[in-house]
Image: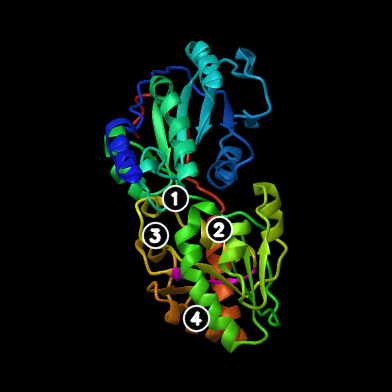
Amino acid sequence: MTRVWLHRLSLAQLAMVAPRGHYQTVPRSVVVLSHGVLPTTDMYLAARLAELGVGEPRYVDTRIEVPAVGLFPDGAFVIVVRHAPRRWLRVLAASASRLSGVVWLLDDDIPGVLASTDLPLHYALRTASRYLVTRDLLARLCHEVWVSTAFLRDKYAAARPRLLQPLYLGAPFHAKAEAVTYFYHGTAAHRLELEFLVGVVRRVQARLENAHFEVIGDEGTRDLFRGIPRVRVQHPMTWPDFLAYTSGVHHAVGLAPMLDSQFNRARSHNKLYDITRAGAVGIYSDLDIYREHVRDGVNGLLLANDEATWAEAVCRLLGDAPVRLAMQREAQAWCEGQRHDPCFRLRAFGDET
């Protein structure tokens, strides 16, 4: 009953931001508001903003800095990443007449979070409440919304959002042929995927005595995999620590299942980057979001969400280093080509080109 009520609430109240901001000044600088140090900022903005030629972007962590009008100079183009507290948006509104633009960047279906019954209830409620209390201010300030996937672009077409796909991060990595570890790096929002992988890992570990599996999670994740041999549960990390960690580990195979759910339909192909950065070749759910970037058998594997099929593929890749490394090299080459977005530029209000 609770979920039914929340679903009705989501339909009634969590409408998408309808941008109403009007700005005429030419962008002279960029200010990025981020509630913490987030992967979203690095994957979607860092490389693009560095190549714009409007000076060094200023990244502001709204959790620890104090909002002040002086943070937004004349001609500043402001990007709100996922969420900004109301006190920050109020200061931003007080500076609006001097700004060149305000955009909201979201890489999840934040307006639809309450309808996603696969998410932990506390996560959905916290995300929804933060959005609800800031939605009207965001709508008044923003002249544009940037989204991470075609799903979000199409779902919220009325807001005329701009599609901004993630770019690759991480230094080139040369995988070691002797690696026999495979992994899945998710969060509490990936409960369906973790439950699916329990069966996969149990099958693989029963067949291969030298296979080791790594997963990131809390005590709940530890309980899911309890009793399966050679499973290491890593404690959740901050984004900077995770980026450094995945740039230095030596894994063989990375798993990226995606089960069908309302929230998952809005996800992007970020895990392709995470897996490649860790020197691994990926196994991905055979869905449009991965089909668009992964060539089956060339730079990864695309599989239906079947436990036995995934377990067989893991065993095959762990046991065939030449094939695995050839696919990893292809994935690395493709990812290296995704470091830049030569077409990106800042658009002022009314600029449709």
Q: Would you say residue 128 is visible in this rendering?
A: yes
User: Residue at label 4?
Assistant: 311
On residue 194, which mark appears?
none
Vertical comparison of 54 with 257: above or below: above
Residue type indicated by callout 3: Ile
Of callouts 2 and 4, the N-terminal one: 2
SS for tag 1? loop
Judged from the image, the secondary structure of the residue bearing numbered disc 2 is loop
Sooner in the amino-acid sequence: mark 2 or mark 3: 2
Badge nearest the viewer, 2 or 3: 2
**Range of the magenta residues?**
279-284
> Measuring 29% from the left and 45% from the top, which residue is drawn there?
154
Q: Nearer the viewer, residue 188 or 134?
A: 188
x and y percent of residue 68 in the render?
63, 15
The image shows residue 167 at horizontal and vertical percentages of 53, 51
Amino acid beneath label 1:
Leu
